Amino acid sequence: MKKRILRAASMTLALSLLVGIWCSGNRFSVIKVSAAEETAPEETEEVSAEDESVGFADSVDIASQVHYVAKPRVVRQAQQVSLRLTDQSRKGDFSVVLDDKDRSFAVAWSSVKLSFAADSPFTRLYIKVERACEWTVTLPDGTEIECGKTGFIHEVTELGQAVTSFDMNLPKGVRLCDVYAFTDGQFPSWVQLWEPPCEKADLLVMPTHADDEYLWFGGTLPYYAGELGYQVQVVYLTNHYNNTQRCHEQLNSLWTVGVRHYPVIGDFVDVLETRDDMSAAYRIFGGRDKVLAFQVEVLRRFSPKVIVAHAVDGEYGHCAHRINVATMRKALTMTNDATAYPESAEKYGTCEVQKCYMHLWKKNKVTVSWGDMPLKRFDDATALDMAKKGFECNISQLDYVLRVHDYGPYDCRQFGLVYTTVGNDTEGVNDFFENVV
């Protein structure tokens, strides 16, 4: 009887240890510890969870009471390597060491070919360019790597080998804004490893300009993208291609609040004339039909379950905001009709959105208390805290009076359900995804 009890206890311990080892990841360390001796580990070995030779009998030696205990895997961190740059387009010797104090949006080199060197080897590059384009990186052995095919202006390039120098060939007239070199290992959190736009989105957030997503929509992005990990796609109506700094701030802010799918940015230019004159704004945007076609295509492409959009009056009356929300509302009634803008229907198919919320809408009101929502992903900072942090990444906009507020006439907590195919919300639930299937 005593032997049966001991054997059962050993089997239970073995199973528990196996579960712990399996859950620790695909690679882990195993330490043999004698049950009869509470001493330091005698042996450590690397094994793979996918190795079929590691089974129950291999994990616990019941007869000798030797147990295998999972040891946390140590993740190797990538090391940043300091680069020197030479601009080949200039006459005479010219070089600069790119270190932290020199990195700013003012560091923008315009050249067809740039050469870089370092004192220690590196295997990866993190590159920022002023606008989407394709370029090449040439390694010392002649290997040529094509870059920029993603359309991202912040991109990581894997070199496939350790080198101490490389050449970068840019299209004429395109400026390199920044470049960082790294060894193998886990990147620091500020390196942006963007994923392509969503195939299909749970949530489609539709600001007009970079910073609108925080000013008016509050903690929507840090909560649904950062904390809950939903498939969240951000689509900006206008672009800031006439302001290189703002393009980089736009990406920095999204990355800060947990968005990982690269944003879609419309072809409609952001200029002052689009703020106060509706007819001028439509004319600059190429006409109402062009904007409406864009909105219908966006909805069909991402087939979102839920949309979050501007106030009907454009918050403080901004005409581009008003155009954005008006054409979006019209598009909602057209996405399921294949005869409406048939090109996008043929490309993406038709769709039907389940819910659409608008900022400050007076009916079917929802109050989302972002300031009362601590987020584990962000060390218990609230969704409101993170919205403010995201907004503050838009450094070029901080001289203006607007800020993220959960009170007052532009209260970022206040929304209304303007469109639904799944029924109205329950009072007090205050969740954009209530009733969504």
Image (cartoon, helix red, strand yellow):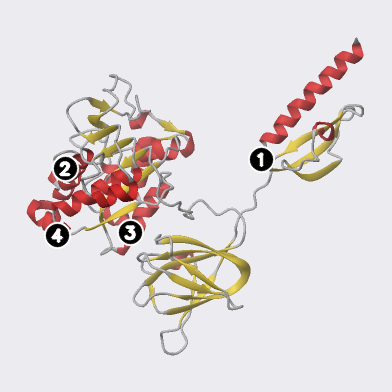
**Image location of residue 251, percent across then percent down:** 38, 54
**Image location of residue 257, percent across then percent down:** 40, 44
Q: Which residue is mark 2?
A: 326
Q: How many angstroms separate mark 1 from mark 2 (CA)?
A: 49 Å
Query: At label 1, which amino acid type do we have?
Result: Gly
Circle 4/circle 1 CB separation < 8 Å: no
Q: Which residue is mark 3?
A: 247
Q: How many angstroms separate mark 4 from mark 1 (CA)?
A: 54 Å
Q: Secondary structure at mark 4?
A: helix
Q: Secondary structure at mark 1?
A: loop
Q: How many angstroms separate mark 3 from mark 1 (CA)?
A: 38 Å
Q: Residue at x 44, y 36 (%)?
A: 227
Within 10 Å of the Cα at label 1, are there few (<14), some (14-19), or many (20+) other Cα atoms? few
Residue 25 numbered mark, or none: 1
Front of the two marks 4 and 3: 4
Query: At label 2, which amino acid type do we have?
Result: Ala
Q: How many angstroms separate mark 4 from mark 3 (CA)?
A: 20 Å
Residue 211 numbered mark, or none: none
Front of the two marks 1 and 2: 2
Q: How many angstroms separate mark 2 from mark 3 (CA)?
A: 25 Å
Q: In the image, is 271 to the left or to the right of 378?
A: left
Which quadrant holds residue 309?
Answer: top left
Q: Residue at x 32, y 55 (%)?
A: 395
Res. 298 visible in picture? yes
Query: At label 4, which amino acid type do we have?
Result: Ile
Q: Residue at x 35, y 38 (%)?
A: 203
**Image location of residue 368, percent across then percent down:** 31, 29
Residue 284 numbered mark, or none: 4
